[in-house]
Amino acid sequence: MEHLLYWVGLAAVAVNALTGVLDAGRKNMDLVGVVMVGSATALGGGTVRDLLLDRQVFWISDQTYLVAALATTLLVFFLVRGLRLPPRLFLVPDAVGLALFTIVGTQVALEWEAPWLAASLLGVITGVVGGVLRDVLCNDVPLVFVRGELYASAAWAGALTLIGLQALDVTPVVAAWSGMVVVLVLRFLAMAFRITLPTYTERK
Amino acid sequence: MEHLLYWVGLAAVAVNALTGVLDAGRKNMDLVGVVMVGSATALGGGTVRDLLLDRQVFWISDQTYLVAALATTLLVFFLVRGLRLPPRLFLVPDAVGLALFTIVGTQVALEWEAPWLAASLLGVITGVVGGVLRDVLCNDVPLVFVRGELYASAAWAGALTLIGLQALDVTPVVAAWSGMVVVLVLRFLAMAFRITLPTYTERK
Amino acid sequence: MEHLLYWVGLAAVAVNALTGVLDAGRKNMDLVGVVMVGSATALGGGTVRDLLLDRQVFWISDQTYLVAALATTLLVFFLVRGLRLPPRLFLVPDAVGLALFTIVGTQVALEWEAPWLAASLLGVITGVVGGVLRDVLCNDVPLVFVRGELYASAAWAGALTLIGLQALDVTPVVAAWSGMVVVLVLRFLAMAFRITLPTYTERK
């Protein structure tokens, strides 16, 4: 499980760095701007989780994550710049990053003995904060606040799936993969069919 | 005193969640948006205080606060949505939340052995951060920056009242209530009579 | 070295408070707004560094920094208000604050046993966060994101200079001054000659 978490964490960092670069690139930022947005997207969620759990920040205790974020950022910058990519393309890695980070974040919070409800929210925070930072730094409305599409709620459902399955004695690895699948399926369904939640003023 | 602090803290969480929901509702957010804004308003100030004090975050060490924030948020959401409330109404719970959080925050910082000036500022931070997060997430100008009305300064006066009275050997409970009254009275006077502070370019 | 760091830290706090007041003043904020922006600019970078390093926040463990920030803020407020200063004037103290904070931040991170790459980024964070907070609170585009001028990259070069010279066994005091000079020279050259980095869409 430790092993799986480590690689899923690295993959999440790389995927989120990729979305950061694609977004920063659309805004014509320079190299340092792109590196900053890519790193903040890749490392922001886990950093906030570690601060809230009073745990050593993961990219300071293991510099590999930092190197992964910087390397992905630079690689994508030099490979992709100049290309015109369809803007909706980056919604796919964004959903993958959301799923990976939510599950890693929930699992780390549980191991750090956070109570289950707090752990599920820490998972959601790990999943969404990187993207929120990216969107704020690039001056977009954060995807998590775009009305009418499941985003944080998809992450929350995945985190609760992981916690529920573990409470039912499913093996941790199966529970983790199931949680990720739940996030991804809900997020893709939401984008495909524009699934919405009730809004405040609906009842007229 | 511990006992008083605990209940005042829970009341502050509920009152701040209420203001978050009212504000998010005005912006037609959906259920998840409302829950996120309500929770951030309710838990943001204390979270920042605990991070600065290197103390375990209060809603992770005691999940009751988290349940109180979520329950208030959902209750207000389903009770109030569809109603048209006068927009200035929410200034009253906002002032109450400011007073409660400022006093709890100052008291916790003192118990955590912060020096007095730092403790008074940590009280102000606990009081105002929740509302700032709410206003930023709802895309309003934060109330604390609205020119011409005491807000952070009312909180600071209350925090200094608490610290001063305790230094004069007044019992902690009396000092706490006095501090809360000072914040509320100053804030309501400021709103009623538009009391202002000197501005930078006044001297012409 | 400890001694040097302490005074450089106090100087950085005062200089950054000054830039905060000048900027807040341009926006006609009132006294409390100016105090808040000045303090956030002065203390923000070091606070984020200490949170990331899981170190006690410097202005809570030693209240001197807090007093320096407040005293500078109030002094500048009452001395300068009403004067019309040329807007580009504040770029000079801003560059000095960037240099001082970057070097102090890097040095503290190294002493706290952060690995070198993480330490250099913690130095950059210490250097730029105060100014970003100032610009966000004053509703400007953060200087660090203004395209076409070295800013974070100047800080990073200075941090890497400090780390590289120490690895080459140069005495810490000489390494620290050299790092500061590198930041200042790069920043002033960048402002004078509008030195730019490659941007994402350059390759047409």
Image (tube, coloured by chain):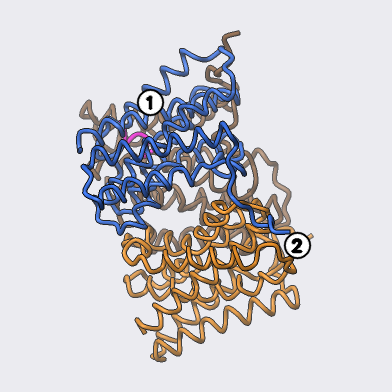
Chain colours: A orange, B brown, C blue
| Distance CA(mark 1)–CA(mark 2) | 48 Å
| Numbered disc 2: secondary structure | loop
**Highlighted range, magenta:** B117-123
| Label 1: chain letter | C
Query: Dot 1, how many residues are within 10 Å of its Cα: few (below 14), some (14-19), or many (20+)?
Result: many
Is label 1 or label 2 in front?
Answer: 1
**Pointer 1: what residue?**
C70
Relative to C100, does residue B18 appear above or below in the rendering? below
Find out whether residue B119 is within the magenta segment.
yes
Say which element carries label 1: helix
Q: Indicate the quadrant containing the N terminus of chain C: top left, top right, bottom left or bottom right.
A: top left
Q: Residue at position x 43%, y 64% from top?
A: A46
Q: x%, y% of residue C46? A: 36, 42
**Image position, residue B133 (x, y; %):** 54, 47
Q: Which mark is residue A202?
A: 2
> Is C201 left or right of C47, judged from the image as shown?
right
What chain does mark 2 sit on?
A: A
Which residue, as the protein is rendered here, is positioned at the far top? Answer: B204
Q: Amino acid at mark 1?
A: Leu
